[in-house]
Image (tube, rainbow, N blue to C red):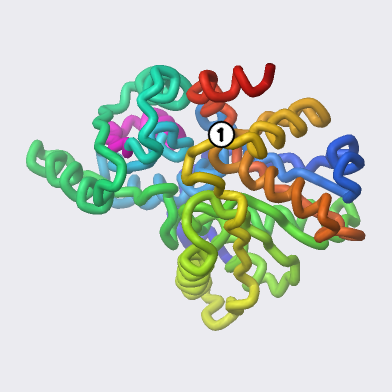
Amino acid sequence: MHLARFPRARFAHLPTPLEPLPRLGAELGIDLWVKRDDCTGLAGGGNKTRKLEFLLGEALALGADTLVTQGAVQSNHVRQTIAAGARHGLSTEVILEERTGSKASDYMGNGNVLLDRLMGASIRFVPGGTDMNEELEASAEIVRRRGGKPYVIPGGGSNTVGALGYVDCARELVVQADGLDLKIDRLVTATGSAGTHAGLVAGFAALSVDIPILGFGVRAPKAKQEENVFNLAVATAETIGAAGRVRREAVVADCDYVGEGYGLVDQGVIDALALAARTAGLLLDPVYSGKAMKGLIDQARKGTFKGERVVFLHTGGAQGLFGYQSVLEPALG
């Protein structure tokens, strides 16, 4: 857990707040708190900022001059990566996958995409289903050919370097909870590219902290999601000197709330966005935190969390709401 061993560029607003949500909790019949990782500060914040502190630390240590990354059209990760590059004087080459198939003008040009352009990234769009690893390497090779030095960041910043950000978050959360004499019975978060979930699992394992983590999936089926998280958690634990500490049973994903697919919004997501906004002034996003809240709400109403104190990790992404205006507005009335 001695994370000072790893290169790090510090720009996140940390620690992020740990706050009670009394009205939303009362609505759901649970003691509900929120870990505000939407408040990390970089171009509007979000969970990728923690990962990017370590990723940028390595990129700068290697002498990179260009960041190369990818994501879906309304990627929160891409927005924060471009901002991190701009802050440190690095160019950013971005590949955006048209993963949802939407060609709506707000989806293709507003929200995160507008911010990406504002921050000056070089952006190219590719069709859904494209091999994004191949595209990353192709972009990196173009940078090399023109004399640049690329640093490739995988989708979501989810590798062992990026996951260190959530090893650190696990430590931060435990310190905050101890300072408040707050016993946490369960941590709930969205789980997608796996880095956030895996870092938390590895961090708690290294600390010998027994806080169950429930990840609500946003894309992959349960078996695949849990495999991805477990493999990355094991590798991350090895990186920090905690090899053998991650138990398979510590990785739990509920992928029953994905709906029609990644980035596609249904009425349950819209209801979750509205309930969080109207009871807590909490702005979630339609792709990650909104689907996790949809799952949390449904499971709470089914009694899954009865008698528990639950902390919801808010991964940010409200900037993406503006890319979904044409979908949300009619449903909100």
Confirm whether residue 289 shows in the render. Answer: yes
Q: Where does the C terminus fall, quadrant-wise?
A: top right
- Asked whether 94 falls inside the magenta stretch, the response is yes
Please tell me which residue lies in front, 201 or 207.
Answer: 201
Give residue 27's position: percent from left, percent from top.
Answer: 88, 40
- Asked whether 257 falls inside the magenta stretch, the response is no
* Above-or-below relation of 151 to 303: above
Give residue 119's position: percent from left, percent from top.
Answer: 38, 22
Please tell me which residue lies in front, 13 or 159.
Answer: 159
Identify residue type, mark 1: Gly
Please tell me which residue lies in front, 202 or 300.
Answer: 300
Q: Residue at x 50, y 45 (%)?
A: 260
Q: Residues within 10 Å of mark 1 (few under 14, many from 20)?
A: many
Q: Which residues are magenta?
A: 79-97
The tally of labels here is 1
* Tag 1 secondary structure: loop
Q: Residue furthest bottom?
A: 244
Reading the image, the residue beneath label 1 is 317
Question: Relative to residue 82, is residue 5 drawn left or right?
Answer: right
Q: Residue at x 54, y 64 (%)?
A: 222
Give residue 229's position: percent from left, percent from top.
Answer: 51, 65
Confirm whether residue 149 shows in the render. Answer: no
Q: Residue at x 24, y 31 (%)?
A: 124
Please tell me which residue lies in front, 240 or 118.
Answer: 118
* Above-or-below relation of 55 to 174: above
Give residue 253's position: percent from left, percent from top.
Answer: 60, 62
Q: Where does the N terminus fall, quadrant-wise?
A: bottom right
Q: Residue at x 45, y 40 (%)?
A: 77
Q: Residue furthest left?
A: 145
